[in-house]
Amino acid sequence: MPHPHPSRRAVLTTAAATTAALAGTIPAAAARGSSPTAADSRRIREVIRRMGLEEKVGQLFVMRIYGSSATDPDPADVAANQSEIGVANAAELIAKYHVGGIIYFAWAHNTQNPDQIADLSNGIQRAALAQATPVPMFISTDQEQGAVERIGAPATTFAGGMALGANGSPGDARTAARVIGTELAAMGVNQNYSPVSDVNINPANPVIGVRSFGADPQAVATLAAAQVKGYQSAGIASTAKHFPGHGDTGTDSHFALPIITHTLEQWQQIDAPPFRAAIAAGIDSIMTAHILVPALDDSGDPATLSHPILTGILREQLGYDGLVVTDSLGMEGVREKYGDDRVPVLALKAGADQLLNPPLLDVAYQGVLDAVKSGELTEERIEVSLTRILGLKFRNGLFADPYVTHAGVRRSVGTRSHLATADRVTDRGITLLTNDAGLLPFPRRSHRDLLVVGADPAAPSGTGGPPTAVLAKAFSELGHPAQALSTGTAPSQAVIDQAVAAAQGKDAVIVATYNVTAAAPEQIALVTALTATGVPVVQLAIRNPYDIAYLPPVAASLAGYGWTDVTLRAAARVIAGTVRPTGRLPVAVPRADDPATALYPIGYGLRY
C-alpha cells in the first residue's frame, strides 16, 4: 500500500586519431550536446559494419574492474579480477570481452584521488582505442552525492537528493549537478547514474530514502529535470533511475525482489512524473529497477526483464528512445527467477540497451552470444541498442577526444568556487523541526562548551573523519569548543553512562541520530538519558528525517539528511547561528504511534 502521505564526464594519441578518422573528424566542442546528424548516422553505421558479433555484444556490457590502474593494478586487485572476471586488469577486460563501458567503485579501488582517476580513465580509453575496431568507452559511476558517493574529497561533494529536496530550489539542484558533472568530466567519467528519480513515499524504504528528492511527485519531477540539465550541460550523460519507480518499497532489491502494489492510476500520479520530466528535459539514459509492478506487468518478471514496462510503457507510451541501462545484474532482485545466462538476454528482449555489472561476465556474455546464434535474439536487435550507445558516444564527443589531463583536473576539481557553492547549497537544506526551548541560535559573541555524541556511520574516503569528530571540529572553528564522543547506532548502557558523564558541565549536547526506530531502542535510550541530565540536548538526524517521532522532547531538533562533511558543517553553521535555517521537509514525518497521521507535514520547517 502507498504511504498515506505521498509527500519527492589532452592529448589525442595515435589510437584516438585512428578512431577520429574512422568516425569522421569532428571538433569535440561541436559534438557535445548536439543532436545526431545524417553524417553521424553514416559514421555509426560504418563503425558497426567493421564489428564482428563478439564486438557488438561486448559493447552492450558495462563492467566493474578492480584497481587504480588500467594496466598495472596492485597484486590483490589482479587476484580479484582473475577470480571474478578471468582477466588481470582493465586492458585485458576490454581485449577479451570488448565491453563498451566500465563502472567505477570506491571499494574496487578505482577512485583514490582525482589525478589517479584521470589516469585510470585515460588508460581505459587507450586500451579501448587499441582494439581492432577502436571505440571509446563509457566510464560511469554512481555519484549521486550524500548516501551514495563514489568519489570523495578533494573533489567537491554536495548533500544528497533529499537535502536538495529540502532546499527546494531547481536552480540549486541544477547548479549542483553542473558542478558534479564538470568535475566528473575532468576526471574522465562521462556517464553518471544520477539523478535518483524515485518518489520516496515510504518512510521504511531501505534502499532509496534520502537518495530521493522527496515524496511530492511534482517537486521530485522538477528537481530531477533540473539535475538532468545540469549534468548534461557539463558534457556528461545523465541517468534517471530507477524506472518505473522504486520509492514505495520496504524491500531492498540488492537482496530480494520488491513488489510495488500501486495501481496504474497511482503509478501515473506518483511514480511516472519524474521520468516524464526527465524525458522532456532530454535525459540521455534511464536505469531500470529490479521490482515487480503487477499493475504494469502481471507476468511475475521484474521491470528490468519486462517488455510491457520497458518497451510498452517507457518506449511507446512515454516516447523515450534514449539509452536504457539495467541496474546491476548482480542484484538478487533480478536473479531470483532466471539464471545469470538468461537475465541479460531477457533484459535485451524487454528493451534494455546497456547491461550493467553482471556477476559472471563470461556467463552473461556467452548467454547473449548464444541467443543470437540460436535466433532468439537477432543481430539486428543487438544493432538497435549498439546504435543508441554509439550515438551517445558521438554526441558527447568521445569519438573526437575521450582523454583528460591533470591540468584539467586542477582547473575543475575541488576548486574554491565549487566548494563554496556546495556549502551555500547545502546550508539551504538544513531543516529546523523544533526549537521549543529557544536554545537556537547560540548567542553571538558568546561561546558554548559542547559535547557531540552519536552515530558514526561509514563515510566516503577523503572525508574529515567520523561524523561526531567532523561536527565537533566545525563547532570549535565557529567558536564553540566541542568534545566528540562516538556512541554508535546501538550504544550499550556503559556507553550511555559514559555520554551522561561527559555531558556534565557542558552548555549543550549535540546528538547525531541515525535511522531511529522503535525496534532498535538504543539511540532512544541515549537521548532519554541525556535529556535527564538537564543539559540542553540538540538532536540532529543525519540520515532519514523521521527520527524525531521516536525520541523524547529535546531542546531543539534538526534534519540534515546526510552525514558527509559538507552536510555536517552546514548543520553546525545553522545550530551556531551563522546561517539561518531555511530547509523545509520534502517528506512527511509520520507519528510513531499512528503512521497514518503526520507529525510534521511536507513543507514544514522553522525559522529564526
Image (tube, rainbow, N blue to C red):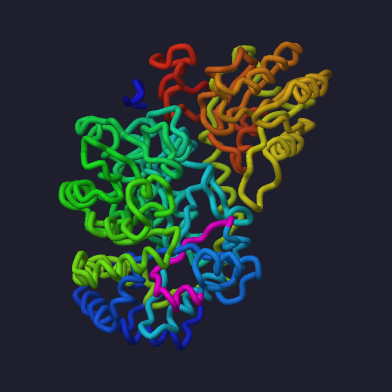
Q: Residue 369 versus residue 249: which sits nearer the camera?
A: 369
Q: Quick check: 512 left or right of 362?
A: right
The residue shown at (36%, 35%) is 199
Residue 89 appearing in the image: yes
Indicate the position of residue 410 as horizontal and vertical percent values: 60, 66
Occupied quadrant, residue 453: top right
Quadrant of residue 30 within the rendered picture? bottom left
Image quadrant in which the N terminus is located = top left
Q: In which quarter of the image is the C terminus?
A: top right
Can you see residue 9? Answer: no
Q: In this view, does 580 lie above or below 601?
A: below
In the rendered picture of this protein, how many numbered marks are placed on residues?
A: 0
* Residue 66 located within the stretch drawn in magenta: no
Measured from the top left, where is residue 430 in percent x and y? 54, 32
Q: Is 62 or 111 nearer to us in this picture?
A: 62
Classify residue 364 as left or right of residue 457: left
Decide: is 597 above or below 363: above
Q: In the image, what residue occupies the spot 48% across and 36% down?
A: 210
Which portion, as a residue range, is magenta?
A: 91-107
Quick check: 12 above or below 552?
below
Q: Which residue is drawn at 79% across and 32% down?
A: 483
* Residue 105 part of the magenta segment: yes
Residue in the picture at 59% in, 17% down: 551
Q: Position of residue 467 (x, y in %)?
A: 67, 38
Towards the viewer: 569 or 399: 399
Instruction: Tell which of 390 and 100 is nearer to you.
Output: 100
Residue 366 drawn at (x, y percent): 35, 69
Q: Please give left or right for residue 215 compared with residue 111 in the image.
A: left
